[in-house]
Image (spheres, rainbow, N blue to C red):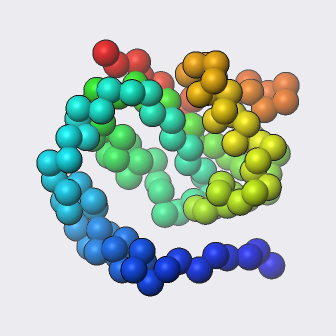
Amino acid sequence: KRKREKMPKGVYLQLANWCDNPNGLFDAFPDNNYRKINVPLLAFTFTDDWYCPPKAVNELLNHFTNASVTWYHLKPKEIGLKQVGHIDFFNAEMRSTLWQSILQWIDKGERNTIQKNHLNIKPYWYEERS
């Protein structure tokens, strides 16, 4: 059985409030200058995460109009896992898999591919913006 972390009540209530808005936190904080962020952004989503379908993630990332976006939408099997879901990315077991890919992405500036052992995975979406 998978272990689930409990979310603090205040965090849950804030998240529920955002989810009640058609545009989520962008309705709650409409002018927080998302469009001014001009840094590389890295996003991971997984095919077994029904909380984050590609359409929703695309809508989210489109708010960051000046950021260079690298987005991976992965099947857990592509990275040698049976499941990832919505929150397992944050489990310590990921330290030797995707967390290493993030460090590689940050340290080496390798924005358009991640490497997991001998496997090269191309991003679902990569857009260099200036």
Query: Which residue lies at the image location 45% right of the left edge and 33% below the top edge?
Result: 41
Decide if residue 116 is on the left or right side of residue 17: right
Q: Is residue 114 visible?
A: no
Residue lying farthest to the top in this orientation: 130
Decide if residue 73 is on the left or right side of residue 58: right
Decide if residue 62 is on the left or right side of residue 10: left
Query: Which residue lies at the image location 65% right of the left edge and 57% below the top edge?
Result: 90
Q: Position of residue 113 (x, y in %)?
A: 63, 23
Q: Taking 16 as reference, is 102 above or below it?
A: above
Q: Position of residue 30 (x, y in %)?
A: 16, 53
Query: Which residue lies at the image location 34% right of the left edge and 74% below the top edge?
Result: 14
Decide if residue 18 is on the left or right side of residue 85: left
- Pick the quarter of the image with the N terminus: bottom right
Residue lying farthest to the right in this orientation: 118
Q: Taking 124 as reference, is 130 above or below it?
A: above
- Pick the quarter of the image with the C terminus: top left
Q: Is residue 111 visible?
A: yes
Residue lying farthest to the left in this orientation: 31
